Every structure is written in C-alpha cells, then in structure tokens.
Amino acid sequence: MRIMLLFGAGFFCLLFLSKPWPAHAASEYTDGPNATARAPIVRLKRESVDELCVTRCQDKIAVVFIHGLFGSRETWLNVATNAFWPHLIASDDSFNHALDVYVVDYDSFLLRKGPSATQLRDEMAREIDALLSKKYKQIVLIGHSLGGILARAYLLHVKTAFGHRALNSFGNTITLGSPGSGASIANLGRILSANQQLRVLTPIEENDFQQLLTSSWSDVDKKRLTRTHCDLLVTRAAYETLETPPIGLVVSKASATVFSSVAKGFALTHEALAKPASMQDELYKWVKEPILECAKGTRSCGDGAQASCVEVDEPPSNPRSR
C-alpha cells in the first residue's frame, strides 16, 4: 500500500508539474493573512471574432468556458490538432454569428495555497454578472472538473442576488467530468499540494462546500417547482470512460452525473474531456447540439422573461393562522 501511495504521489506531481503554467501565476496572488491581489484572480476574456454585442443582445447566446483545478486557458487546447475549443465554437458557421464566446481564467497553483473556491465564486460573479445586463437569449456555462462546481456555485449567487427569473437566463449548463459528489483522488492531492481548492473536490462526506451546495440547490429546485412556476435548469453532464493510468477514473460516472438532467459518457480521459480534436469530434457535437437548437429557436432557451416565472420568496402562509 505504501509503495502504491508513493507511486501515485509521484505520478500526481508529474501530471501537474508537466502542465504549461500561465506567466502571471507567480506574481498575482500572495498567501497569508495580509494577502493582496495585485491583479485580478479571475479574468474573463472574450474570444469571439464577431463584433461585440454591447447592450441589448437578445438575438445572441453567450458561451462561457470555465477550466478546472491547476488549469488555465490551455485547458481547452488540443495540442495534437491545435484546436482551441472556444475558438472552434466561435468560428462555427452553423451559429451564423449568434454567439459571444468567453473564457474564465483563474489562479490555481500546484505549490501555493492560492484563492479559495469561495473567493473564486465571488470574483467570477463580478465578471459574469455583467453579461446579465446585456440580456442575452441564453448564457451557457461550460465547466471542466472544478469549473463545473464553480459554475453551480455561481448560479446560486445569481438566484440570491437577482432572483429566480434571472436564473432562467442560464437554462443550459454543461459540466465535463465535474465531481458533484467529490473524488477520492483529491485526498491524495491535498497531501501533495497546498492548493485549498482541492478541498472542494474531496468526497462529499467530508466536503462541507459541496454539502452546502447540494442542500441549497435542493431548496432552489423545490421552490422553482412548487412556488415560482419556473422551469428547472437543465444540466448536461459528460463523463470519462477511459482511465488515466495509474489512477484509473479520476471522476466516477456516479459523481460526474449526480446533478445532471442529461448525461453521456465519452471514450476519453478526464483531461481529454476539455479538448475536442475538431468540430467533427463527438464531444464537440454533443455540447454544440442544445446551444444550436436554442440559437435556431427549435429548443427553449430558458427565457429570462418567462411570464409564468414569478418571485415568491416569502414562506407560505399557515392556514391555521388565518
């Protein structure tokens, strides 16, 4: 057992030390009680080549990519084909210029503590909230691994800050290997890395962040069904079926699909779930399908102005008190 742990530890280090690290990583965040962010810890960059939709964007869809632990913009790059997923979908003629594509990049270090998941959610809110004011037809969040967890946490912020009707703008969220009930490999990672974001990925039995997230979403879903007459949000989950040697499956099917409305497995490793080779890739086409249907009007986009969706946040009256 000790030999297996040492081997796994060595592989964990090799896997993540071999990743390309963004040039800003060493200078943007200082750990400790007097930590200061010398530059934003979360950055939102537009990747579309079309003219920017500035104010009223009812005819366009915003697609927002959110990478996972130890990731960066390069998470979405397939090195073998040089295909960068945000650029693939931004240049896809099928959408007829109906997309604004964005990439969220955030600090996630191997050997340093860095920002917590709660800090990331709050900083993401400052960046992504601005998209709500543009009145997009739909805002699609695509999160790989931890990115999917952060997407769900951000959507809870939307409900709290703006209400149920605002949530309708996010009618289609896509997660790629996101461990909704945690992953045991994160426990090994916490031994080897100081990154506090790993706590969010540990098995849910010992993960208060995910426990609160699950409980809060349960309450939101019940209220949307029984009191606000708002549609439930659709979450599509892709999961890996190929093992990453010598770890095995980084995120199990059960964990990756625990919150999903629609789920599909792909013969890919965990890392490859973020790297379609081309527009003909099965994964790319699966993610593209509901976005294109919304763009063409053949599928509901979760209209933020849904007439039947009303805000009823006060507790129901007690008949005995009347």
Image: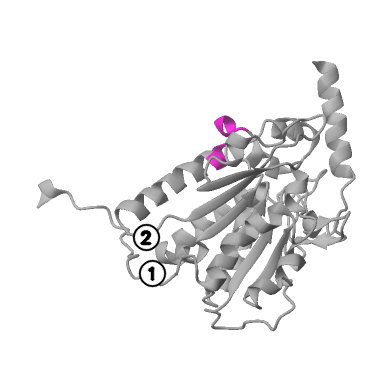
**Residues at marks 2 and 1 touching, judged by CB atoms closer than 8 Å:** yes
Q: For the point 77% across and 57% down, which residue is it?
A: 76
Residue receiving disc 2: 230
**Where the N terminus falls, by quadrant?**
top right
Residue beneath the point at 46% across and 62% down = 167
Label 2 crowding class (10 Å Cα cut-off): few <14, some 14-19, many 20+? many
**Residue 41 in sight here:** no
Seen at 78% across and 59% down, the residue is 278
- What type of secondary structure mainly makes up the magenta span? helix
Query: Does residue 115 appear left or right of residue 9 in this picture?
Result: left
Q: Residue at x 58, y 31 (%)?
A: 206
Residue 77 placed where, x, y %? 81, 57
Where residue 251 sits, quadrant-wise, is top right
Where does the magenta region start and end?
A: 203-210
Whole-percent x, y for residue 263 in the image? 57, 45
Is 8 colored magenta in this rendering? no
Left or right of residue 267: residue 24: right
Which one is in front, 316 or 82? 82
- In the image, residue 85 sits, relative to residue 114, either above or below, namely below
First in sequence, mark 2 or 1: give its number: 2
The quarter holding residue 193 reads top right
Residue 218 position, x and y percent, is 42, 45
Three-letter amino acid code at disc 1?
Gln
Mark 1 Cα shell of 10 Å, populated few (<14), some (14-19), many (≥20): some
Q: Which residue is mark 1?
A: 306
